[in-house]
Image (cartoon, helix red, strand yellow):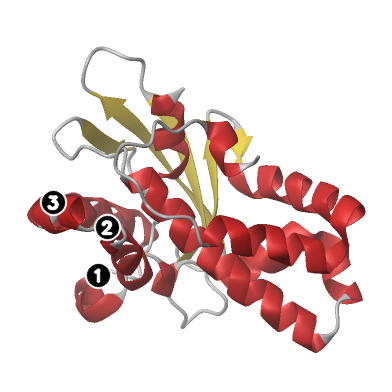
Amino acid sequence: MKSVVIGLFVLIFASTMGSAQSSELDTENPFRMLEQIAERMTARIGEERSRIEANPNYLRTIMEEELLPYSDYQFAARSVLARNWQRLNEDQQKEFVEVFREYLITTYARVFTQFDESKHKLNFARGGDYEGQRRVVVRAQLVEEGGRPPIRLDFHMQRRNPEAPWMAFDLVAEGVSMLNTQQAEMQASLRQNGIDGTIQLLRERASVDIRLDEDLDVSDFTN
């Protein structure tokens, strides 16, 4: 199951590195952009391995700097609430987006504790047509050393307007959509706990300590 966790989250739902290096990314071509991101993330994790081992919470900084700027977490936050989004007042909407953002940062950081840059490799399919498109699917396979079957990954990208950069808004791993899974969980939480309880649930998950010795499973991010 650990390899499935890695397939679901590591390398690419992240699919958008910003920070000071963003000007070097080919943000016009979503297929090439994802390849560049994978290469950069692999290199950075390797170069900063000693700092991560000394302070695992530093992974939060890396996630915030490298993944969030080009991840459409605002769209994802609205999507997981579905029609319930319109039932929130402006302050509740703002608070939900902010805590959802922190939750994603922690989720990415926890999963990257499982990442080994020497064992994982992402192979991309040939790029498709993106000219004039608002949404595209970038297909890839995550290969793990040791002979395990590759994990099929479909990265759903969109741009808000023709001049905007491409952003990731969903990852489908072996047919399972992260966005749909989170939406189902948020709907269940809203029915049981209301919006205040749901925000508190995300806030608690966002505040956990990052540990390198965690043996993660998919359920660790939904229970």
Q: Mark 2: give few (<14), some (14-19) or many (20+) Cα within 10 Å.
A: many
Measured as percent of width and height from the top left, residue 21 is found at 20, 75
Q: Residue at x 60, y 45 (%)?
A: 178
Quick check: 97 above or below 170? below
Q: Is residue 89 left or right of residue 97?
A: right
User: Is residue 171 at all visible to an observer of this figure?
Assistant: yes
State the separation of the CA atoms marked 1 and 3. 23 Å
In primary-sequence order, the first of circles 3 and 2 is: 2
Callout in the foreground (1, 2)? 2
- Say which residue label 2 marks: 37
Residue 25's label in the rendered image is: 1
Callout 1 touching callout 2 (CB < 8 Å): yes
Q: Nearer the viewer, residue 220 or 124?
A: 220
Measured as percent of width and height from the top left, residue 64 is found at 37, 70
Q: Is residue 120 left or right of residue 46?
A: right
Residue extending furthest bottom?
90
Quick check: 171 above or below 145? below
Measured as percent of width and height from the top left, residue 97 is found at 64, 74
Q: Mark 3: give few (<14), some (14-19) or many (20+) Cα within 10 Å.
A: some
